[in-house]
């Protein structure tokens, strides 16, 4: 099926890039057609936008092949260099690593998404999970192999003294592995997730916890969305390694890693353009027809255990029970598009959310009023239409690195939208009291906040939305990326 | 059914006690016979032993009626003063509060055992639990009522300047409520549980979290089994209240609460006496007959979500898989007696543990070897026989205030017993490297520790057991209690 980790003897000559990016998901993905040809899909996201604005001539983006289609594409050209195979990579060199599928599966699903994600978001049911057994040891070895494949590819392609931007919890070991190969490089790591508090991080086996921290500390700069996550990381380094830490740096074994707070913002122009394309307009018209003069509480999330869709539905139910004057006057438009359905917990969670929506429909629905419309399909244009039409946005994650939906909605909202926001989302640092902050575990408190949001005077709502929109564009992706590059000087 | 909280106009004249104890469970419990008469059962435990040694003439113990039998007994005499109704209370005045059963149920099951216990032991499956909804608010109100009932009873019975010892997470609001009624009293609180780290404690609704901390800070002295739990409490006071804290005190709003570390130990004499009674001897003989010359890994726990019986079984399975030379040479004698079967999570957990034991039996059992004997009945004499016969004791809680089993076994062990011990139990502070410390989530690490324990040389095992026995009697219940009384001077 696969060639395993890249073998340097087969690789193309060094691209001698001066800026390199490493992330699990790259800017392109491929689907294999029945006739064996490949459909390429260009992704968006902050990283793509940001890189374009930095100039891409001298950039290599190293990513993993995520699917069979990706693997086919990566194998067609030496070293997985998609840009040399006629694909539109936006001017960048893109190198897609063809990692053995079983190794990739263990690294990505078992370690990154089922272990590190769960630790940093505090998602485990601790009486029985996690259980770090012999299987876990094999999975952890695969995670090292996966990180090592990135390190070798980057080491090959980097010019002397080049800067490397490593993304997220998939690649926590990479900074150290890369530094061991190429001590001349300047390495930054960015965590898009929260970081676990010490007492939660310590669930990891001691050697795994240490390797994770030491891996990160191979970087010269470690970036986070929020000071809270940076402090949690530093606290883990102090408690588990005995490192010397403050809010700006961690020093261990003679090397200092600077800590940086880079709260990613939104590219207003491209979002507004996309948010007014025809497909969004038509969905908006349809939504408005259904809503009539009812108010809309919207939410848009991946169906992700950390997003707290279930307590959001409980809060909406409690709103309708305790504030009955809202019955018939409000509709909850909840978009919960599928995510990580490889993992049984996620399938069960989706099913549970669907059952809860049916219960609310059964308890309150009437012939001429649907209290809730839950959509579990992935329709980006519909999500953007929800952004525009919502009177209230509910963003109540149990823990969230940042949450960009909260930043996007104020930019697209037509008539102003009150954001009911979890204190446990990184964005709460920046929004403060301009949002209505809630404890995400407090269903009653969330119901009260929804009532307050629905009751808010138009001018107050509009003024808050304006201020939130200003905050949301403070650090657009281009600047966010440039700041991290600058931090390496 | 019940008289609700005590009404001071109906109460007996003040007993004017100089030392008062408040705990949910008292020293006596009652079962109603079919003919309406009551069977009284005298409990043991550190508090009973400790109080006896302090002299009981001037003591009032206030507790709650826990069952219908208790309520009947409490209602037979004014103010629930059991000692005035001919019951053997060991010379103490015992006042059993007849709290409305529905109120008691909400306070005890919903708040104390399903909320505060879960928070301090970090037991929630956070994607969906806890969900603090309108029902929770009623439950919390009941918890306040329950604490208030204790406060009123204590306020009635306490002499001017008396000392009051408040026990555990059932009664966190009591110190403040009592101080409000009787500012002259000297109040100590002791937490037998761990304390949650800040990021976990914050799952509680803000007002509930504050009331809990402020309740505790009504005490002049707050005692814990471990410095780690005291620091966690202080950290919560600093983070949520802005209190001034160090390792020895918390100051908030002009009042200082001293922090004390009182790691409860064992009364060796009474344990050894009980451990050699006839019922224990006969069970020991039976166990030895079954074991033959096989080594015994023992565990004795309530079937409690925090005790980590499930990962213990996984570790034992991994031991037999990865160290096959132990097959046929070792038996795991696991006593997991029933606990909190009012709560569905606990019933399911017991069933799960039983299924896992059957799986191990099916995977490894032979005609002449049962790899595991799981006993889910409550038989104290059998537990003590396990203490005496075990070569290895497995104590692997995910989080535990102290864990007294780990301290009792070294005192009763016949031939020395290696303690494989979770780093997350309070007792790990005192045992250190004389136990084999394990991360309770690390199944493979626990399996390795079991192998090491089984392989240990006799003299090493005996020497460790001797040292552990010395540590275990360092602070017997009488001294533990006396220290807390002294701390109030």
Image (tube, coloured by chain):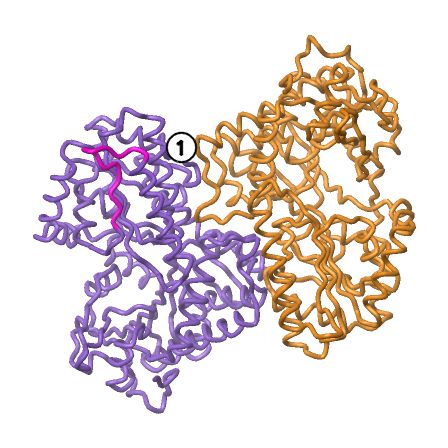
Chain colours: A orange, B purple
Q: Which residue is mark 1?
A: B445
Quadrant in which the C terminus of chain B is drawn: bottom left
Q: Residue at x 75, y 68 (%)?
A: A331
Q: Is residue B131 above or below residue A126?
A: below
Q: Residue furthest top?
A: A9
The location of residue A111, given as percent across then percent down, is 56, 34
Q: In this image, A336 relative to B185: left or right?
A: right
**Could you tell whether A140 is left or right of B387 in the image?**
right
Residue reaching furthest to the front: A35
Residue A195 location (% of width, % of height): 61, 43
Choose top left, top right, bottom left or bottom right for residue A115.
top right
Q: Secondary structure at mark 1?
A: helix
The front one of B470 and B310 is B310
- Residue drawn at x 32%, y 43% as measured from the top left: B357
Q: Image quadrant of residue B191?
A: bottom left
User: Which quadrant would residue B413 be assigned to in this image?
Assistant: top left
Residue extent of the magenta highlight: B363-375
Q: Nearer the viewer, residue B347 or B11?
A: B347
């Amino acid at each position: 099926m696969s060639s395993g980790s890249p073998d340097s003897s087969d690789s193309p000559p060094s691209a001698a890039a001066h800026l390199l990016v490493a992330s699990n998901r790259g800017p392109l993905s491929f689907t294999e057609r029945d006739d064996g040809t490949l459909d390429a899909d260009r992704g968006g996201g902050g990283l793509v936008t940001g890189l374009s604005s930095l100039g891409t001539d001298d950039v290599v983006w190293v990513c993993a092949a995520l699917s069979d289609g990706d693997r086919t594409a990566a194998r067609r050209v030496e070293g997985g260099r998609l840009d040399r195979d006629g694909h539109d990579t936006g001017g960048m060199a893109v190198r897609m690593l063809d990692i053995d599928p079983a190794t990739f599966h263990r690294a990505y699903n078992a370690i990154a998404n089922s272990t590190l994600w769960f630790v940093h978001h505090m998602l485990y049911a601790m009486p029985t999970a996690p259980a770090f057994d012999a299987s876990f040891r094999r999975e952890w070895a695969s995670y090292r192999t996966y990180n090592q494949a990135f390190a070798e590819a980057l080491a090959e392609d980097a010019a002397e003294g080049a800067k490397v931007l490593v993304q997220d919890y998939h690649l926590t070991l990479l900074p150290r592995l890369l530094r061991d190969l190429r001590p001349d490089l300047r390495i930054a790591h960015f965590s898009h997730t929260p970081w676990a508090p010490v007492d939660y991080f310590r669930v990891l086996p001691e050697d795994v916890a240490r390797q994770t921290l030491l891996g990160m500390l191979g970087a010269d700069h470690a970036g986070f969305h929020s000071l809270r996550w940076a402090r949690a990381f530093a606290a883990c380094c102090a408690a588990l390694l005995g490192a010397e830490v403050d809010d700006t740096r961690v020093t261990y074994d003679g090397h200092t890693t600077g800590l940086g707070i880079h709260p990613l913002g939104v590219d207003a122009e491209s979002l507004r353009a996309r948010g007014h394309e025809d497909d969004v307009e038509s969905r908006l018209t349809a939504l408005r027809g259904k809503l009539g003069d009812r108010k809309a509480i919207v939410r848009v999330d991946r169906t992700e255990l950390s997003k707290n869709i279930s307590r959001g539905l409980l809060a909406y139910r409690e709103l309708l029970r305790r504030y009955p004057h809202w019955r018939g006057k409000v509709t909850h438009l909840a978009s919960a598009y599928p995510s990580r359905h490889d993992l049984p917990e996620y399938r069960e969670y989706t099913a549970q959310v669907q059952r809860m929506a049916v219960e609310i429909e059964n308890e309150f629905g009437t012939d001429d009023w649907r209290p809730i419309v839950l959509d579990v399909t992935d329709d980006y244009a519909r999500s953007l239409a929800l952004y525009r039409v919502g009177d209230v946005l509910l963003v109540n994650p149990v823990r969230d690195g940042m949450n960009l939906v909260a930043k996007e909605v104020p930019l697209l909202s037509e008539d102003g939208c009150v954001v009911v926001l979890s204190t446990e989302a990184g964005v709460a640092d920046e929004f403060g009291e301009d949002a209505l902050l809630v404890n995400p575990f407090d269903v009653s408190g969330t119901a009260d906040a929804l009532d307050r949001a629905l009751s808010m005077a138009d001018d107050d709502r509009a003024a808050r939305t304006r201020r939130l929109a200003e905050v949301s564009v403070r650090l657009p992706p281009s600047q966010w990326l440039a700041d991290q590059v600058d931090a390496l000087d």
